[in-house]
Amino acid sequence: MIKKPLRILLVEDDGSIARIIVIAMRNLGVPYQLDQAYSAEEGLELWDREPYNLVLTDYNLRGMTGTAMIAALRDHGAADLPTVLFTAYDDANVRKEARAVGITHFIAKPFVIEGFVDLVRGLLPINASEIGSPPV
């Protein structure tokens, strides 16, 4: 039986940061599909097409914030969805907002990209046989 790869959604409106994350994710070590959105609203549209196994989002986005997007996903039944919020706005109010919507991990920018990939890897199923083989 062929299983689908893990689905990861990256929501980041800074193209340079998004490219760095996309390149670094190649070292994730499990089969995955990474979709990118440039706004929270676009991320919600992608989610509505097919849910994801993990959402990675910046806090400060055009339109709604990353925490508002996660709150909307939680309202759509994604209560146990692993989420990572990264932001340059590391203050008590943002951290409080992140806790209130159930963000799994909060990362302040700048961050070490290898540590980011390790964190993501830790949020995914560790048994590759559960998620299938990499595409040929």
Image (cartoon, rainbow, N blue to C red):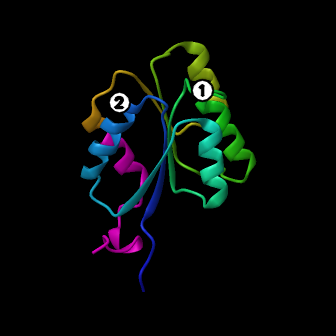
Quadrant for residue 68, please give it: top right
Residue 45 percent location from the top left of the image: 65, 49
Q: Is residue 101 visible?
A: no
**Whether residue 37 can be seen here:** yes
Q: Label 1 neighbourhood size at 10 Å, few (<14), some (14-19), many (20+)?
A: few
Quadrant including the N terminus:
bottom left
**Residue 79 locus on image (x, y percent):** 66, 50
Residues drawn in magenta: 116-136
Q: Is residue 79 magenta?
A: no
Please identify the quadrant where the C terminus is shown.
Answer: bottom left
Figure quadrant of residue 111: top left
When the figure is inspected, residue 104 is found, relative to residue 90, above or below; the finding is below
Could you tell me if the residues under marks 1 and 2 are in contact, i.e. CB atoms within 8 Å? no
Q: Secondary structure at mark 1?
A: loop
- Circle 2 sits in a helix, a strand or a loop, which is it? helix
Q: Residue at x 32, y 74 (%)?
A: 133
Residue 22 higher or lower than 128, as above or below: above
Q: Earlier in the sequence, mark 1 or mark 2?
A: 2
The residue under the point 50% across, 16% down is 89
The answer to whether 123 is drawn above or below residue 100 in the figure is: below
Camera-nearest residue between 52 and 48: 48
> Is-magenta flag for residue 120?
yes
Residue farthest to the bottom? 1
> Callout 1, which amino acid?
Arg
- Callout 2: few (<14), some (14-19), or many (20+) C-alpha neighbours within 10 Å? few
What's the distance in space between the residues labelled 1 and 2, CA to CA? 16 Å
Residue at the disc numbered 1: 62
Q: Residue at x 41, y 61 (%)?
A: 125
Left or right: 95, with 41 as reference point: left
Amino acid type, label 2: Ser
Which residue position is annotated with label 2? Answer: 16
The location of residue 40, given as percent across then percent down, is 61, 37
